[in-house]
Image (spheres, rainbow, N blue to C red):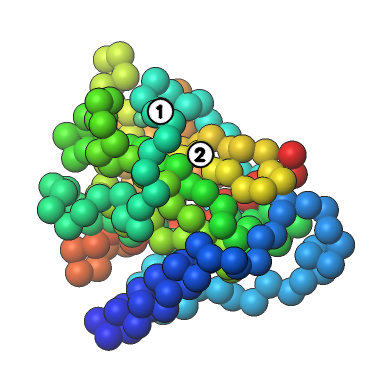
Amino acid sequence: MLSILLHRRSFLTGLLGATGAGLLQACTHNAAAADTVIAPTRAIPLDEAPPPVRACGAATVDQIEGPFYKPRAPHRLAIANDREPGERLVITGTVKSTRCAPLAKAELDIWHADARGDYDNDGYHLRGILATDEQGRFELRSIVPGRYLNGKRYRPSHLHVKLRAHGCEELTTQLYFANDPYLDGDPFMHSSLVMPHRTAGGVRRAAFDFVLQAA
Ligand SMILES: [Fe+2]
């Protein structure tokens, strides 16, 4: 528990620092950035989170926006507060360029359904923008989204995200969870966007590294 608290404190400190005059790395084909050796950035012990699904290289697969996106969501440190009904969810990871440069101050514009499968289309409940720290890291805290009907079948549990970073093409995609019985047959799901996950202490933990291509 102590290690979790220490990690969270150091992460939040880094995140708050990134909102200041931190280094802004662009999504460029800068040779120096490309040659930089990226040290492991995740301070989470291996028994707390699975390894990320993707390494940098190819850009993350894009997905349809869907009908429920709303621009101008508020910037938040957590998408759901502690009183939100549902299974707790923590997704950690990084945002990098295709040349493996970590992207500081990248924005993750998140929206997803509540535990019953409903979107808030009037306000900004379960919507928010997160920012990466100076190492391109993020920590997404929310609840596991509920499934909802798409025609006659349920879509698997998923989160929508738009990613924006200086010099990069905006990416719109979705994240899914391994072992969801509704993955097979979903018309949108892509296997590269399915996250392994584990639950410990009542919290579902997953990891994902996003890769953006230069604009
Ligand atoms: Fe959706």
Residue 164 in the image, given as x and y percentages of width and height:
58, 44
Q: Cβ(mark 1) to ligand 1 < 8 Å? A: no
Q: Quadrant of the N terminus?
A: bottom left
Residue extending furthest toward the top: 151
- Residue lying at 50% horizontally and 44% vertically, measured from the top left: 193
Residue labelled with disc 1: 69
The amino acid on which the numbered mark 2 sits, given as a three-letter code, is: Lys
Q: Does residue 22 appear in this view?
A: yes
- Residue lying at 16% horizontally and 49% vertically, measured from the top left: 84
Mark 1, Cα crowd under 10 Å, few <14 / some 14-19 / many 20+, is: some
Q: Quadrant of the C terminus?
A: top right
Residue extending furthest toward the right: 31
Residue extending furthest toward the front: 21
Q: Does residue 93 appear in this view?
A: no
Residue 73 in the image, given as x and y percentages of width and height:
38, 38
207 vs 1, left or right, is right
- Where 121 falls versus 59 (above or below)? above
> How many numbered marks have been drawn onto this rendered protein structure?
2
Residue extending furthest toward the bottom: 2
Mark 2, Cα crowd under 10 Å, few <14 / some 14-19 / many 20+, is: some
Residue 107 in the image, given as x and y percentages of width and height:
52, 49
Q: Quadrant of ligand 1?
A: top left
Question: Is the Cβ of the residue at disc 1 closer than 8 Å to that at disc 2?
Answer: yes
Q: Quadrant of residue 41?
A: bottom right
Return the residue nearer the eye: 104 or 44: 104
The amino acid on which the numbered mark 1 sits, given as a three-letter code, is: Tyr
- The numbered mark, 1 or 2, whose residue comes first in the sequence reads 1
Q: Residue 162: give its label.
A: 2
61 vs 7, left or right, is right
Return the residue nearer the eye: 123 or 47: 123
